[in-house]
Structure formats: structure tokens, C-alpha cells
Image: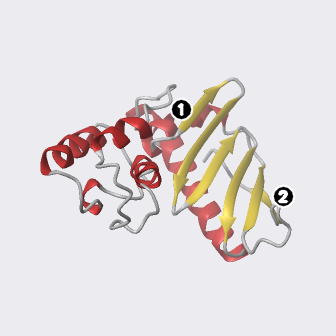
Amino acid sequence: MLLKGYRKEITRPECRREALSLHCIAHLDQDISEVLPYLNAKLGGDQYLKDPPSLTFKNQGKLITLHPQMIGINALRDEAEADKILEWLKGEINETWEKRYEIEPSFETPDKPKILEILKLLPKTNCRECGQPTCMVFATLVAEGGRDPEDCLSLEEENRIKLGKYMNSFRFDL
């Protein structure tokens, strides 16, 4: 077992004290830097940094960042949600550490979809049939994995296929 415990700190966002969401910082009792490249491979991190080591990824609509002795989680509903995510992470960290000999570590940040490449394939009519105010907003949501090419009702079939292939070349392990 790599991670045995942590001390949790719940705060409101500094920039918006009136916000309803909470942030959580977990101060870890152990250094987890050695497991970060394995977690990057397993969880599909959005950003991996070697120096200083950190891993950032999205899960359950939250942005989570792991540092050697700290975990940060944003946009939490309440403390119970923080506890649930921290216990899940503790389990993932320890399971990944135990199985590290079976996992090829990843020291890279994966490529991400480019919004302008997505926009090139869209009709650019800003028709709002997708529920978004502009095709640019829709393209951004597609790039983030929040929308699919099928959600654009005005998209020509040829471009729908091209966009589907383009997006399938990226992994979304959210």
C-alpha cells in the first residue's frame, strides 16, 4: 500500500466566495510521485508534468490534479462528494501501485482534439439546432468530449464521418 492516509481541507473558490461549489485539497501522508506515470497510463491524464511531477485529468465532471504530496479537486457539491472521490483516488493509487509491473508507465501528455479542426468540418451556420449559440461553442464541447458529431443536426454526412474518425483518434476516459 503506497497511500495510507491524508488530511482534507475544504474551501470555497478564492475568486468567487459566493460560489456554491467547493474545492478540496488533500494533504497526503505519503509521497506518490513514483505512481504518477502509471496513473497517467491507467487513467488517461489530460496533462502530465515531469518536473515538478503532477498529473491532471477529468473525472465525474471534476478537474483533479495529483501532486507528490497533495491532491486538488474542483467544483464539488459538498464534503461527502469530496470524500467519495478521495477514497476512489486512494483505491486507484494503491491498486495501480500494486499492479505497476503490469502497466507501461506513460510520461507524456496525450494529444488533444483541436477546436479549429473540428470547426472546419461543421456547417458554421450558427443555427443553434444543437442547443449551442455558435458552431465555435459546439466545436469546443466536442473537443472536450461533452458532445458528439451526431449532435449537430446540420452536419453533412461526409463531414459527420470525418469528424467521427477524427474524434475516435483521441481517447476519452472521463
Which residue carries the number 2 mark? 15
Cα distance, mark 2 to mark 1?
Answer: 32 Å
Camera-side residue of 82 and 99: 82
Q: Residue at x 65, y 46 (%)?
A: 65
Q: Is residue 131 visible?
A: yes
Which residue carries the number 1 mark? 37
Camera-side residue of 124 and 155: 124
From this view, report whether residue 110 is shown above or below residue 124.
Answer: above
Quadrant for the C terminus in the image: bottom left
Instruction: Indicate the position of residue 67 as horizontal and vertical percent values.
Output: 70, 40
Residue type at mark 1 is: Pro
Which circle's residue, 2 or 1, is located before the other in the chain? 2
Instruction: Indicate the position of residue 13 as horizontal and vertical percent values.
Output: 81, 61
Q: Describe residue 27's horizontal placement relative to residue 158 as left or right.
A: right
Residue 22 occupies which quadrant of the picture?
bottom right
Q: Residue at x 60, y 64 (%)?
A: 85
Camera-side residue of 58 and 95: 58
Quick one: which residue is furthest to the left in this view? 158
Instruction: Indicate the position of residue 94 as horizontal and vertical percent values.
Output: 56, 49
Local secondary structure at mark 2: loop
User: Disc 2 vs disc 1: which is toward the camera?
Assistant: 2
